[in-house]
Image (tube, rainbow, N blue to C red):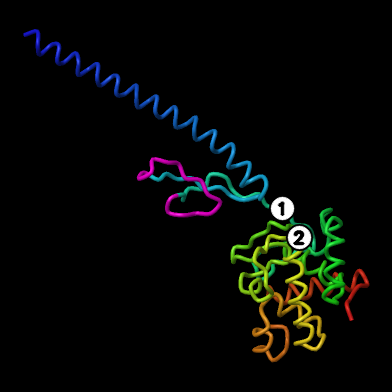
């Protein structure tokens, strides 16, 4: 008679301990998650203005955090921080919405680099500034949904074409973008509108359009806005 009672009592004690252990484990996981989020949100969201996705990897018993969605981290935890768009903004082929009217303070910080590259490549610095403003708004860490990187939003193929290994390196990014503009200037015989259209949509798109600005709304807006900016500052490259 006593044995069944003791057995039942032990079962209840084990059940209580198990529940308490699970509760403690959940609490520890929450604390660990909060600590991890504090670090990751700071590095991913604040420095790069990026989104944060969260998930779990049962096989590894780990929490997965990422700045892009994946099967392991599919739940949006923190949305991306978007810079405010001012009048004159234009969406480039790379998918970024940027302003060509009011460049930020960091444009002045990059002036020496841009002017040095302009002398090296023999291209007007005003054209480099206008393209950077439209492409990335002077954000050296910008990455578009299509994978374009850095100040001049180099696609991986373009970066390789001009010998860039790390497109986040400011000097290399600007030099490659400016070199591409210079190449386009020769290919389209100095026609700035066609050069801009080709930088945005690719030179073959301009060729297929009969050496005219392709009828892509984004490309036409891109060319129109940059040309207006160059003319308004009296810095249209010749």
Name the foreground residue: 154 vs 93: 154
146 over 162 or under it: above or below: above
Does label 1 or label 2 sit earlier along the sequence? 1
- Per the picture, the main secondary structure of the magenta-coloured stretch is loop
Query: Disc 2 designates what residue?
Result: 137
Q: Secondary structure at mark 2?
A: loop
The percent position of residue 48, horizontal first and vertical second, equals 66, 50
Quadrant where the C terminus is found in the figure: bottom right
Please give the range of residues in magenta.
58-72
Q: Are marks 1 and 2 in contact (CB under 8 Å)?
A: yes
The percent position of residue 67, horizontal first and vertical second, equals 56, 51
Task: Name the quadrant containing residue 164.
Answer: bottom right
- For label 2, count other residues whose C-alpha is less than 10 Å away and answer few (under 14), some (14-19) or many (20+): many
Residue at image position (55%, 38%) is: 37
- For label 1, count other residues whose C-alpha is less than 10 Å away and answer few (under 14), some (14-19) or many (20+): few
Q: Secondary structure at mark 1?
A: loop
Name the foreground residue: 217 vs 92: 92
Task: Name the quadrant containing residue 97.
Answer: bottom right
Spot the residue most to the top. Answer: 2
Residue at image position (87%, 66%) is: 115
Residue 83: mark: 1
Quadrant where the N terminus is found in the figure: top left
Judged by depth in the image, the label closer to the viewer, 1 or 2, is 2
Spot the residue most to the left. Answer: 1
233 left or right, relative to 216? right
Please say whether residue 7 is one of the residues in the magenta stretch.
no
Please say whether residue 71 is one of the residues in the magenta stretch.
yes
């Amino acid at each position: 008679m006593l044995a069944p009672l003791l057995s039942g009592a032990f079962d209840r004690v084990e059940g209580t301990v198990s529940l308490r252990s699970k509760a403690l484990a959940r609490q520890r996981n929450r604390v660990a998650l909060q600590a991890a989020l504090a670090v990751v949100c700071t590095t991913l969201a604040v420095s790069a203005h990026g989104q944060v996705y969260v998930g779990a990897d049962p096989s590894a018993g780990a929490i997965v955090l990422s700045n892009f969605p994946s099967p392991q981290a599919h739940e949006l935890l923190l949305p991306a921080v978007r810079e405010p768009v001012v009048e004159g903004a234009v969406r480039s082929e790379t998918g970024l919405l940027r302003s060509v009217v009011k460049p930020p303070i960091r444009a002045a910080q990059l002036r020496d680099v841009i002017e040095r590259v302009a002398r090296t490549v023999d291209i007007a610095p005003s054209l480099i500034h206008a393209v950077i403003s439209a492409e990335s708004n002077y954000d050296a860490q910008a990455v578009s949904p299509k994978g374009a990187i850095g100040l001049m939003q180099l696609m991986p193929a373009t970066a390789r074409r001009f010998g860039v290994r790390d497109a986040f390196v400011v000097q290399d990014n600007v030099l490659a973008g400016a070199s591409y503009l210079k190449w386009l200037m020769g290919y389209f015989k100095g026609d700035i509108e066609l050069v801009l259209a080709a930088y945005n949509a690719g030179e073959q798109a301009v060729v297929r359009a009969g050496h005219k600005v392709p009828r892509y709304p984004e490309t036409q807006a891109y060319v129109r806005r940059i040309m207006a900016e160059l003319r308004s500052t009296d810095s249209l490259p010749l």
